[in-house]
Structure formats: structure tokens, C-alpha cells
Amino acid sequence: MKRWLRRIGIAIAAMFLILTAASLAYNVATSGRDVAATKLYAGPFVRVDGTSLAYRRWGTHGTAILLLGGFVEPSWVWHAVGPLLARRHRVFAIDLPPFGFSERRGPYTLARWVQLVEGFAARLHLARPVVIGHSLGAAVAVRLGAADPPAVRRIVLLDGDALPGGGAGWLSNLLVAPWYTSVYRIVTSSDWIIRRALKDAWGAERPFPTVVVDEFQRPFRVSGTAAAFQSLLGYGIQGVSPATLRQVRVPRIVVWGAQDSVDSVGAGRQTATLLHARFVLIRRAGHLSMLAAPTPVAHAIAAFAG
């Protein structure tokens, strides 16, 4: 028995050394993959509180609308909704760090995201904007509406219940170099993995364009993203408390994809109840409702924004 245990121990140690060596070799071979954000996105950028924020804009007149994406979502996700809203509004979509092409500069917390959005609005002189938060961005919208009601005209929660999820600090402790770097690069370079994840969030009844994979995949190449995600995981899925939802007094609605398999329709209805808000269901759309059904999503937002 001792002999077999010794052999097993030696085999495990040898496998560990082989995999570590392979990981180190792979990391060296792919070391030139990550580049500065400006090499992947032409802008515009604006510096807010020491952080370079990437954003997109549409429209030249009307009430300001701020669009906030969710986890790993670049501001590109609003490329179809933005122009529709721009017919009557000035529309801005922000890359919340460490997503999209904004600078990888933490901390990556709900409080910091709120601070950056407030700074962005002040920097671009956007008085009392309408704030739309998708998925993780919904919590940012709620916190903005609850913390400083006079500064926000209205809020829209899109496929996001704004509530916190479980902590992931233990997971971030397991993401050790060099293995984490290798796994990160392999996963984020895989068209098949990215496509599979996005199709699950898309909705079954809409065609899935291949351009979506590239637009989600490209920001993973921004320098510092792997380390930023490791830091982000330590905070878990961030959100606000039910008590905070009940305290919101700015005008608000909740809009949801009927086929959302990431955050259930039931979760959306529960948040709408806590907010005492109207609930709008978008047919034939999943979690990425702004991509799968941009026209009805833009219509719901525009009708509420005024």
C-alpha cells in the first residue's frame, strides 16, 4: 500500500510539474496577445477621477440618456438601441471597468461604478439623465436613483434584478499563476466558448449574428484584463438590498426579456414589486434583450423617458 501511495504521489507531482511547465510555455508564446485599449478601440474616451472611460454616443439634442451594461458587456451592446433613442435624446453608453475598453483601474465595486457614472455625467454636463442599467448595471442605476434622487431623472432596470448574488472570494484565491493566465487566455480566445455563452443569453427565437462573438471577445485582449477579473471575482456578484429597492423614489420601470435564462422573469417581477414599478415584458428576447430585440426595447425606454 505504501509503495502504491508513493507511486501515486510521484505521478501527481510529475503531472503538476508538466502542466505548470506547459502553462508557462503557453503564457510566453501568447505574451503579445494583450495590448492597450486604444489599439482596439478608437474612442471616444474621457478621463474621470483618474480613470480613462471608453464610451459611445448618439444624438445631438433632447434629454440625456446613460446606458450601462452588465458583466463583460462592452458598450457595443447598445449599438442598435442607441441610434433609435437618439431620435429624441442625447444617448451615451459607458464601458464600466473592467469591461469594454475602459482603463483597468480598480476597485471594481458598486460604489466605484456609481462614482464613475456620476463623474462622467458631470464631465459631459449631463443634467439629470435617464439611467438604464442592464443586468449588473441595474444595481448601479438603482444606487444612483436611491443615493441622489435630484441628480437622476428616471431609471430603467433591463434584465437585472439589482440584488446581490453569492460571494466568490474563495474562487479568486484559486486563480493562481501561471495556470489562471493560461486558462483565461484559452477561454477568452475560444470562439466556440464565447458563442456558447452568448447563445444561452440570446433567446431561442432570434438569429444569432457572428459579429457578436468578435465584439464581446475583443475587450478581453485589453492589457490588465485578466488581473482585473481576478480582483472583480473577490467582490462576488454585487447589488443592493431589498430595503434599498423599497426606498427608491425616482420614476422607474423594469423591462425584461421573456426568454431570459440568466435572470428569470420571476426575479424581474419580484424586483418590480419591491420598487413598486411597472413591469414590461419583451417577447422573443433573452437576457441580451437590447441585442435580440432592439426596437421593442428602445420603444419601452423611449416611452418611459419622455
Image (cartoon, rainbow, N blue to C red):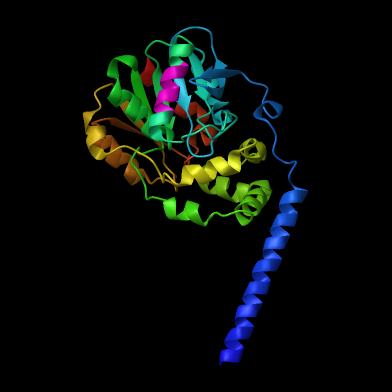
Q: Position of residue 93 (x, y in %)?
A: 52, 23
Locate the C terminus and report the quarter of the image it occupies.
top left
Locate the N terminus and report the quarter of the image it occupies.
bottom right
Between 260 and 185, the one nearer to me in the picture: 185
- Can you see residue 203? no
Between 295 and 112, the one nearer to me in the picture: 112
Residue 119 sits inside the magenta stretch: yes
- Residue 13: name its quadrant: bottom right
At x 39% / y 10%, what residue is drawn? 127
At x 22% / y 33%, what residue is drawn? 246
Left or right position of 294 against 149: right
Q: Position of residue 167 (x, y in %)?
A: 39, 50
Position above or below: 69 against 50: below
Q: Position of residue 261 (x, y in %)?
A: 44, 48
At x 67% / y 25%, what residue is drawn? 38
Left or right position of 304 against 103: left
- Residue 239: name its quadrant: top left
Extent of the magenta region: 113-120
Residue 150 sits inside the magenta stretch: no
Name the residue furthest top: 61
Between 259 and 45, the one nearer to me in the picture: 45
Q: Position of residue 297 (x, y in %)?
A: 45, 29
- Can you see residue 112? yes
